[in-house]
Amino acid sequence: MRKAEWSNSQLLFDHSHWICEATDLRWSAPYHLIVLTETGTTQHTRTICDAEMTYQGRDRPGALTFVPANVERVGSYRHAELSYSALWISPDIQLAGFENLSSLPIFINRTDTVIRSLISSLNSELSRGFKPESLYVEHLAALILMRIRALDGARSQSRGHGKLGTKTLATVRDYIEHHIADDVSLSSLARAVGMKADTFARRFKATTGLPPYAYVLELRTRRAEELLIKTNLPVSAVAHSLGYSSQSHLTATLRRTRGITPRALRASRIPERDNFPEF
């Protein structure tokens, strides 16, 4: 089993392998639950949610299920052998694009390549020993929930959003600078300027052109570049000072975002990049 949590346990993830001959389950949970069958199958699955039949057939790779918080689920499984990834989302979490999460639909054993890709990518990162930051996972969870809402036929409303003022943006930037090595969350950034998370995320992106999680990751990467170029600190010390989980995590990040390793960066002494958004 592989487990991780973020945002004060408001986001949980687990990946498990499950084998059973026959079992019947009845349960509900205080979290919204998204489950992806990664590999394997069942001979027969029967699911009832809120006293209504929602699925009868087989679990197969790529099967996706979403059950809202506190909805009773009754499941009957026969000859199951599968691996699954599960993302648990607290109804109290503040996510960009969601003032509340109470109106999301039940979504049982359907398929969607977008959601499958998002959950699989998170599982892949964790399997390699890299734990993404809270901001990243919050953004990923919001994308998944928006996709579920869209698949249910709901249409998001498109409207313009105001920008953050100069002083507000400076406050956010200062907060990030002082917490660059911490696991910064969307709610912590919003609290720093006294806004709701959803409102803050929209206005921040309208101002900078980047969602908060991407801005923090870019700023952290730039600081890593500066330290590697301007100091002789060991790469492991640079990684630790900026909140990377390990030296290999920093190396993988630089390779993915800059196309270079820390050692190669130091050897070439590349001038500081100037493509970070200016305000």
Image: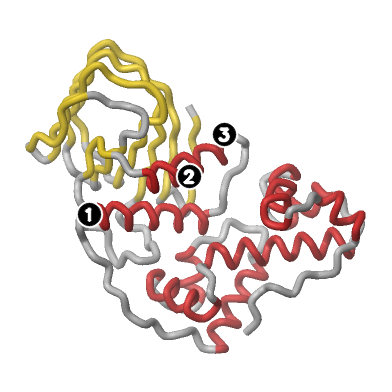
Residue drawn where x is 24% and y is 65% of the image? 155
- Disc on the earlier residue, 1 or 2: 2
* Helix, strand or loop status at disc 3: helix
- Disc on the earlier residue, 3 or 1: 1
Name the side, left or right, on which 204 lies relative to 142: right
Residue nearest the viewer, comparing 210 with 224: 210
Residue drawn where x is 66% and y is 69% of the image? 178
Marks 1/2 in contact by CB < 8 Å: the verdict is no
Q: Disc 3 designates what residue?
A: 127
Q: Disc 1 designates what residue?
A: 104
Name the side, left or right, on which 86 lies relative to 175: left
Question: For residue 3, which numbered disc appears in the image?
Answer: none
- Disc on the earlier residue, 3 or 2: 2
Residue drawn where x is 32% and y is 27% of the image? 60
Asked if 184 appears above or below 85 in the picture, the reply is below
Question: For residue 5, which numbered disc appears in the image?
Answer: 2
Asked if 190 appears above or below 90 in the picture, the reply is below
Asked if 23 appears above or below 15 in the picture, the reply is above
* Quarter occupied by residue 269: bottom right
* Quarter occupied by residue 243: bottom right
Q: Amino acid at mark 3?
A: Ser
* Helix, strand or loop status at disc 1: loop
Q: Amino acid at mark 1?
A: Leu
Q: Quarter holding the C terminus?
A: bottom right
Q: Position of residue 71 (x, y in %)?
A: 18, 43
